[in-house]
Amino acid sequence: MIKVKKIISGSLDVNCYIVYDSETLHAAIIDPGEDGNKVIFEIEKNAFKPEILINTHAHFDHTLSDDKIRLKFKIPLAIHRNEEALLSDSEKNGSDSYDITRTVKKPDMLFESNQEVKLSFASFKVIHTPGHTNGSICLLFDGFLFTGDTLFAGTIGRTDFISGNDVDMRRSLIRLKKLDPSLIIYPGHGSTTTMSNELQHNPYLKD
């Protein structure tokens, strides 16, 4: 059975997710955030076996522990092709604004829009959802969706950062509205929700 473990990481309370098989403990790590030691502790405590590290987008609060984690577990880092440049640019990834000026090394894998990715224990679809950033993605697994900073419970991500775009965000939300309403939504910050709940109550998803 595929399960999801949430770890709140860093000063901006990023939701890091470990998607794992409850029998084999093979896992994928999504958006480890700033606190790599906390994420590593939870992985080792639960004996997870990571296969891949994925960023939904390149903002520093989601990515600063990327290099530490992929070195520790010897796994590839994956991000959407349009987002690669932000990892290595402290102005574009937002870290300059917080006076920490940090970057991440070149990713190992570049996702394409609508790419189907197969892991040893599960598969998922990469949904390109520009708006918060140009290379933002959502990850569609069977029954649940990781939305990064595109869609939150009751609201959406900001579009006023570098490479953000309000028109793109509206188009991305239209795309997400067409997905199965029974999907469980795991956002980059805040509470877990469902697509059905967001369709009913999120003002940004109303026609």
Image (cartoon, helix red, strand yellow):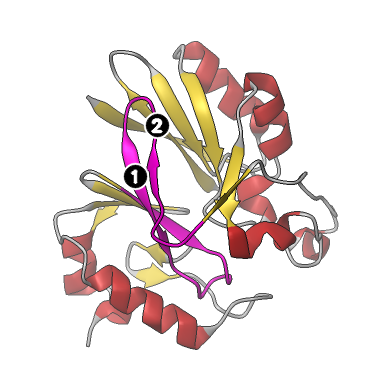
Q: In the rendering, which numbered label is found on residue 119?
A: 2
Of marks 2 and 1, which one's residue comes earlier in the chain?
A: 2
At label 1, which amino acid type do we have?
Phe
Q: Is residue 155 above or below residue 168?
A: above
Residue 163 image offset from top left, x and y in percent: 64, 76
Q: Return the residue nearer the eye: 130 or 65.
A: 130
Q: CB atoms at circles 2 and 1 under 8 Å apart?
A: yes
At label 2, which amino acid type do we have?
Leu
Q: Residue at x 45, y 17 (%)?
A: 48
**Residue 169 highlighted magenta (yes or no):** no
Which residue bears the numbered disc 1? 124
**In this picture, residue 60 sits left or right of residue 147:** right
- Residue stretch in magenta: 112-140
Q: Residue at x 20, y 45 (%)?
A: 143
Q: CA distance from mark 2 to mark 1?
A: 8 Å
Which element carries disc 2, helix, strand or loop?
Answer: loop
Q: Return the residue nearer the eye: 1 or 119.
A: 119
Dot 1: within a 10 Å radius of its alpha carbon, few (fewer than 14), some, or many (20 or more) residues? some
**Residue 127 highlighted magenta (yes or no):** yes
Residue 136 image offset from top left, x and y in percent: 52, 63
Q: Residue at x 60, y 59 (%)?
A: 81
Name the quarter where the C terminus is drawn. Answer: bottom left
Q: Return the residue nearer the eye: 113 or 207.
A: 113
